[in-house]
Amino acid sequence: MDVRAGVAGSGVWPTGDGVVERLAGEKHVWMCTVRPDGTPHVTPVWFVFLSGTWWIGVDGGSVKVRNIGRSPWVSLALEDGRWPVVAEGRARVHRAPFPAAVTAAFTEKYAWDAAAVRRPGEERLLIEVPVRRWLLDGVAH
């Protein structure tokens, strides 16, 4: 999977060494949304990164989805504190059917069907977060 596809020249590509490989290979990203009282809600989530956009699979009733419904601005950070990769963007929630390239990327990375319902009555959603800006791009500041 080419995480840079469609990103060249966009002006929002991170410059640190190894960032492309980390976006393709790391299994978790920490996602921060904002609760109604203004406090942060931070959770590790599975993700794929395609063409300058983070995609995260979630349950329809999750706190993340409710928070995004009120305030769509989110931050995402890869786990390594020594070589930080942190991005911000405006999240959008998608209901099925999902883009084929995104579901294929989740299947390739996790052997997981992003649309598969785990419990009766559950709705699976995808959160799309195009990168607005990179705060840290693999180089500790």
Image (cartoon, rainbow, N blue to C red):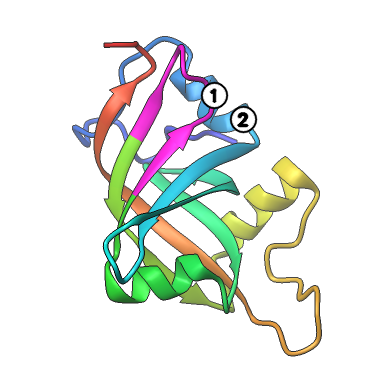
Task: Return the mark for residue 22.
Answer: 1
Q: Residue at x 76, y 76 (%)?
A: 117
- State the extent of the magenta-drawn residues as a range: 75-86
Residue at the spot of label 2: 26
Q: Residue at x 67, y 51 (%)?
A: 106
Side (left or right) of 13 relative to 108: left
Image location (x, y in percent) of residue 14:
31, 24
Q: Residue at x 67, y 54 (%)?
A: 104
Local packing at callout 2 (Cα closer than 10 Å; few below 14, some 14-19, many 20+) is some
Image location (x, y in percent) of residue 38:
27, 62
* Discs 2, 1 touching: Cβ within 8 Å: yes
Dividing the picture into quarters, in which one does residue 103 lie? bottom right
From this view, report whether residue 10 is shown above or below residue 118.
Answer: above
Quadrant of the snapshot with the N terminus: top right
Residue type marked 1? Arg
* Secondary structure state at the residue bearing disc 2: loop
Side (left or right) of 78 relative to 13: right
Magenta stretch contains residue 138: no
Q: CA distance from mark 2 to mark 1?
A: 5 Å
Image location (x, y in percent) of residue 65:
46, 71
Local packing at callout 1 (Cα closer than 10 Å; few below 14, some 14-19, many 20+) is some
Seen from the viewer's position, the closer of residues 138 and 103 is 138
Dividing the picture into quarters, in which one does residue 119 lie? bottom right
* Secondary structure state at the residue bearing disc 1: helix
